[in-house]
Image (cartoon, helix red, strand yellow):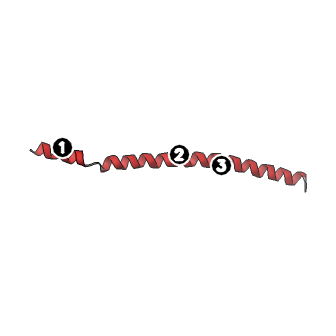
């Protein structure tokens, strides 16, 4: 009787699994944000370099 009760509790308790899934999603979003910011920073840096060179050549 007690074993069945504990089994039902363990099957019904999914909060731990949900927290782990949310943690994985948060980590995935963080990695995607870091990768996109890194790609964007390179593009922005190139844009400023071209603008600076253009201003220095043609004052």
- How far apart marks 2 and 1 lie (CA) works out to 37 Å
Quarter the N terminus occupies: top left
Residue 51 in the figure: left or right of residue 58: left
Q: Position of residue 7 (x, y in %)?
A: 18, 43
Q: Secondary structure at mark 1?
A: helix
- How far apart marks 3 and 2 lie (CA) works out to 14 Å
Residue linked to disc 3: 40
Q: Residue at 30% of width from left, 51% of height from top?
A: 15
Residue linked to disc 1: 7
Q: Are marks 3 and 2 in contact (CB under 8 Å)?
A: no
- How far apart marks 3 and 1 lie (CA) works out to 51 Å
Answer above or below: position of 27 versus 59. Answer: above
Q: Residues within 10 Å of mark 2 (few under 14, many from 20)?
A: few
Q: Position of residue 5 (x, y in %)?
A: 14, 47
Quarter the C terminus occupies: bottom right
Q: Secondary structure at mark 2?
A: helix
Residue 4 in the figure: left or right of residue 39: left
Q: Earlier in the sequence, mark 2 or mark 1?
A: 1
Q: Residue at 29% of width from left, 48% of height from top?
A: 14
Mark number displayed over residue 31: 2
Figure quadrant of residue 3 = top left
Q: Secondary structure at mark 3?
A: helix
């Amino acid at each position: 009787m007690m074993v069945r009760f504990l089994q039902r509790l363990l099957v019904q308790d999914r909060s731990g699994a949900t927290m782990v899934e949310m943690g994985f999603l948060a980590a995935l979003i963080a990695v995607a944000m870091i990768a996109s910011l890194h790609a964007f920073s390179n593009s922005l840096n190139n844009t400023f370099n071209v603008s600076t060179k253009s201003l220095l050549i043609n004052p």
